[in-house]
Image (cartoon, rainbow, N blue to C red):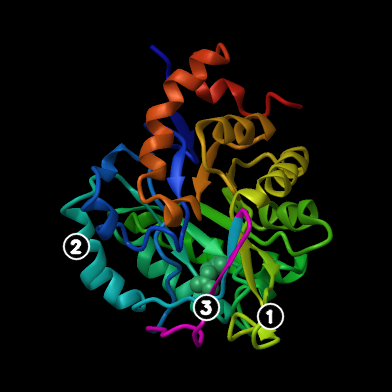
């Protein structure tokens, strides 16, 4: 029997497969389709201090081998997530969940992270400093090492201050590929106190409607994801693995058990699956079910042993 368990920042997971934020809501809809307790965990929708409607529509453009989204962090706001989503989730999911925290200022990141870290169900804070679809927030923090370090340092300090009351959690930072030197930003985050990294968020892209001659997406530019992105994400995981000591969650175009193994060989400890959930809502279930056979095929007994094996 193969061993698929991994440890992510000190928390044990049954397997490394994690639906990515923004592709799995707060879990409820998927729990109607299959038992989501088979997942390693999942990262819930990027949550901000206040409810957000998001960007004007159209927000999605289909592409060959992927899609572009410009959702703009639509979410019910942190208080509703705590008051409504988490209690509903508790009925269908008994594992720690990853809380994706988004924001527009350091104060907002700190306050949302603190509120979510104090919830028993939350296992990790995933600080999203890489959303390409909002102005004055998101990616602005994640494309400059100094600003990235500032927000990570502030959240780290705040979480540490809640340690005694049990309100601290490992801090994972989700980074943008839309930079020249991702390893430099990753290193700045580690230096500022990140416990782990998620690599990568979407690549900026666009499409033009030939009938109107105008951009398909109302916001003109959005974030491109899907299978076409996988080699880029893999390359970034590989490069950042050589620069940092903290665990990396590989994310970008993963849609098969083979992709999971590739990501782990590049340096990932765990792997997020994003747009594949939108094409096939059973994608994560199918990947987890295929993993044991795929491991056997490549002579892998203990999955955690292969992290970084390609170096
Ligand atoms: C969005 O809500 O626009 C997507 C979130 C993200 O890319 O971080």
Whether residue 302 appears in this view of the structure is no
Quarter of the figure with residue 24 = bottom left
Q: Identify the mark nearer the N-term, 3 or 2.
A: 3
Label 2 sits on residue = 87
Write down the residue under mark 3.
59
Q: What's the residue at 53%, 63% (across, down)?
A: 127
Q: Residue at x 68, y 80 (%)?
A: 210
Label 1 or label 2, whichever comes before in sequence order = 2
Q: Is ligand 1 closer than 8 angstroms to the Cβ of mark 3? A: yes
- Magenta segment: 51-65
Q: Main secondary structure of the magenta part?
A: loop
* Nearer mark to the viewer, of 1 and 2: 1
**In the image, what residue occupies the spot 23% across and 45% down?**
94
Q: Nearer the viewer, mark 3 or mark 2?
A: 3
Q: Which residue is mark 1?
A: 210
Q: Quadrant of the C terminus?
A: top right
């Amino acid at each position: 029997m193969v061993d698929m368990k991994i440890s992510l920042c000190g928390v044990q997971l049954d397997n490394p497969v994690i639906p990515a934020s923004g592709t799995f809501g707060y879990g409820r809809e998927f729990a109607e389709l299959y038992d989501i307790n088979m997942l390693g965990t999942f990262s819930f929708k990027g949550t901000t201090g206040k409810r957000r409607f998001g960007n004007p529509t159209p927000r999605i453009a289909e592409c060959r081998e992927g899609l572009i989204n410009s959702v703009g962090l639509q979410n019910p706001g942190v208080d509703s997530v705590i008051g409504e989503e988490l209690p509903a989730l508790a009925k269908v999911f008994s594992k720690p969940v990853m809380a994706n925290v988004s924001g527009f200022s350091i104060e907002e990141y700190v306050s949302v992270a603190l509120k979510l870290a104090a919830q028993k169900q939350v296992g990790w804070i995933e600080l999203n400093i890489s959303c390409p679809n909002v102005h004055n927030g998101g990616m602005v923090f994640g494309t400059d090492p100094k600003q990235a370090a500032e927000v990570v340092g502030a959240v780290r300090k705040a979480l540490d201050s809640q340690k005694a009351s049990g309100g601290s959690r490992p801090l994972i930072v989700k980074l943008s590929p839309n930079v020249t030197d991702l390893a430099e930003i990753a290193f700045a985050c580690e230096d500022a106190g990140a416990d782990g990294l998620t690599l990568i968020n979407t690549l900026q892209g666009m499409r033009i409607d030939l009938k109107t001659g105008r951009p398909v997406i109302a916001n003109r530019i959005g974030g491109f994801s899907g299978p076409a992105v996988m080699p880029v994400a893999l390359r970034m995981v590989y490069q950042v693995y050589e620069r940092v000591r903290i665990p990396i969650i590989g994310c970008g175009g993963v849609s098969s058990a083979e992709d999971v193994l590739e990501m782990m060989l590049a340096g990932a400890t765990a792997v997020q699956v994003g747009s594949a959930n939108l094409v096939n809502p059973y994608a994560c279930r199918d990947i987890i079910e295929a993993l044991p056979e795929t491991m056997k095929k490549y002579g892998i007994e203990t999955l955690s042993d292969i992290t970084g094996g390609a170096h």
